[in-house]
Amino acid sequence: MSLRYATLGLLSKWEASGYDIKKEFHDIMSIFWHTHLSQIYPELKKLENENLISSKLIPQMGKPDKKIYSITEDGREVLLKWLLESNEIPKIKDSFLMQTFFLDNIPVDEVLLKLNMQKKERRQRLEIMKIMSKEKLESIKERNVMTARILMASAVLRRGIEQEKQYIKWCEETISLVEYCKYLWEKNDDYLTPSTENVESQNTTSIPFTEVEDVLLKYFADIVDEV
């Protein structure tokens, strides 16, 4: 459903081809939404069938005609109605956090490897966003132009950068936590081996909480201070 409104939103200020729209999704919009070209064209067709957008063919020298889309008055009404609706806080779906929850099932070295790989990928994503941010600001300065759309896009870009920084910080702190508590994995020798025994009889490591209290309180220090 969000692809529908994103497409209307993009067409609210300019006419564009399906490829142009895809380029926008690869730019700042990639911070909060991902889509494929194979999803965009069916959505454009659906919106046109509902009279929310219209299209026209633009002749090109030595190339097939280019199809350009624009929003209709009906489409603008649908977009404005959506923009004025109240939003629920989005439900999180993070496959890496799902894996992290169950990483007690694999050797601790593999746990640390996964966390370090995630940190590396997040750093790479952050660098891309920083470059994007610099290029956008330089472009705005060079063109000496500012619009409400550019202002709000800049706000989204900053939020994306802050999010990646926080994820990297979490990775680093979690790596330190796991390294300190490595011995919790030491007796878990039969990783991913099915067992018919009761949970109480399985060979797992347990230690007194007091042994890790200081490091765990430090790990949650920022959160505890804010509560």
Image (cartoon, rainbow, N blue to C red):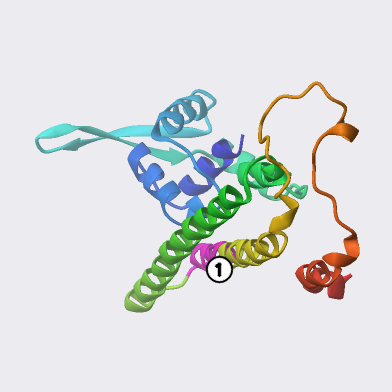
Q: Is residue 81 above or below residue 166?
A: above
Quarter of the image with the C terminus is bottom right
Horizontal and vertical percent position of residue 171: 61, 61
Residue 135 lies in quadrant: bottom left
Residue in view at x 60 percent, y 39 percent: 2
Q: Is residue 151 above or below residue 112?
A: below
**Residue, disc 1:** 158
Residue 140 lies in quadrant: bottom left
Horizontal and vertical percent position of residue 196: 80, 21
Horizontal and vertical percent position of residue 70: 43, 40
The boundaries of the magenta stretch are 147-161
Q: Is residue 130 above or below residue 31?
A: below
Give yes or no for residue 153 being in the magenta stretch: yes
Residue in view at x 35 percent, y 71 percent: 139
Quarter of the image with the N terminus is top right
Please state if 182 lies on the left or on the right of 19 as rendered: right
Q: Main secondary structure of the magenta part?
A: helix
Please state if 147 lies on the left or on the right of 134 as rendered: right
Horizontal and vertical percent position of residue 169: 62, 67
Residue in view at x 40 percent, y 73 percent: 134
Crowding at mark 1 (Cα within 10 Å: few <14, some 14-19, many 20+): some
Please state if 30 lies on the left or on the right of 97 as rendered: left
- The one of 36 and 143 positioned closer to us in this rendering: 36
- The one of 48 and 110 positioned closer to us in this rendering: 110
